Image (cartoon, coloured by chain):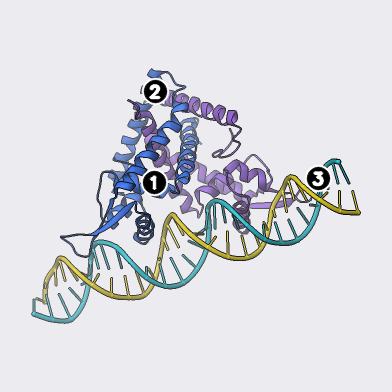
Chain colours: A blue, B purple, C cyan, D yellow
Amino acid sequence: MRSDDALEDALVRTSFRVMAVLTRIGSDHDLSLTQLRVLGLLRDRRPRMTELAAFLGLDKSTMSGLVERAERRGLVARGRSAEDRRAVDVFITPEGRELTDRVQEEIRAELAPFTDRLRADDRHLLTRLLDSLSDAATAHQAARGAAGTLPLGRA
Amino acid sequence: MRSDDALEDALVRTSFRVMAVLTRIGSDHDLSLTQLRVLGLLRDRRPRMTELAAFLGLDKSTMSGLVERAERRGLVARGRSAEDRRAVDVFITPEGRELTDRVQEEIRAELAPFTDRLRADDRHLLTRLLDSLSDAATAHQAARGAAGTLPLGRA
DNA sequence: TGAGTTTGGTTGGTAAGACAAACTATGTCA
DNA sequence: TGACATAGTTTGTCTTACCAACCAAACTCA
């Protein structure tokens, strides 16, 4: 037990708060956290099933179901790849994109009341610190060769 | 779309990272995120089923199953309340406590490599900023009368 | 070239997590 | 006492998630 685990604990506490917000807003639109991540990922990518599964750290069979249900709702679609006829790539539909954008706005709006309590310079500071944390995490994962478990959008 | 959503985005990104760590460590011990939260909550409380459900923002029927499985594993136990014979209160067992402590240590240890990249004064700063964010969130929730959805441990 | 292997995805089975509705047992109070 | 409210459980359904088995296409190399 290190003398100061305060930062680690604060990170965990904050993360649970944020996840609670995401879960609630997601469920308002019948989207699970995982589906939120899928849609976020597809905003600027058109990956194959396996890539998508690797990004999310999920089994490919899990991806099949996830994409299946999202496709039934018209949020994403599947297309056979031209080069490799075994492969299937997944992309977001206009409806999916529209929903994703709306949800993202809601999330930001829902988080803003908290972040707005900070003074402007503190907000910038916090952003910078969180970003450098994320960079450290990315470097760390890359070093281990762990592709998986990337979060929402890019990087 | 506000001009700087950078902080909100950074929070979401960071939270997904942290959750990924929690999920992985949890699953190493056959514990879901929710079970982690239950155990964390029970470390210093002995609530009733309904209270527990309210804390976690879950339906009481979900709690029944959750507690049932944890009880079968010997991590928690149920006791009929003396005052109200309908009520059931839940408490952690010594095994449960031991496991919870171990998992918490692992989580801290797993997060430390990232946080350690920050300079000491940045760490303190970040802790302070996150805590004031949490306080804002607590105040906000209290104001709305929303009891639910508290995260890990206390506060 | 063609048999054997690897790779990409789906299918089927199982279990947990989550909700809603129905139900049981207790408690409250007019 | 009888009507209503509260605490938990049970049952049924859906989603998420895994694993193992499977099929089809692509690769490999003897």
Look at mark 1 in the image and give the residue it sits on. A36
Q: Which mark is residue A123?
A: 2
Query: Residue flagged by tag 2: what amino acid is it?
Result: Arg
Distance Cα–Cα, label 3 vs label 1: 45 Å
In what element is the residue under mark 2? helix
Residue B122: image quadrant is top left
Query: Residue flagged by tag 3: what amino acid is it?
Result: Glu
Distance Cα–Cα, label 3 vs label 2: 49 Å
The residue at the point 36 percent across, 52 percent down is: A57
Q: Bin the neighbour count of mark 3 within 10 Å (Cα to Cα): few under 14, some 14-19, many 20 and up.
A: few
In the rendered image, the vertical position of residue A12 relative to residue A149, given as above or below: above
In the rendered image, the vertical position of residue A64 relative to residue B63, given as above or below: below
Q: Position of residue A67 (x, y in %)?
A: 35, 56
Look at mark 3 in the image and give the residue it sits on. B83
In what element is the residue under mark 3? loop
User: In front: mark 2 or mark 1?
Assistant: 1
Q: Which mark is residue B102?
A: none
Q: Are marks 3 and 1 in contact (CB under 8 Å)?
A: no
A129 to the left or right of D15 = left
Residue B69: image quadrant is bottom right
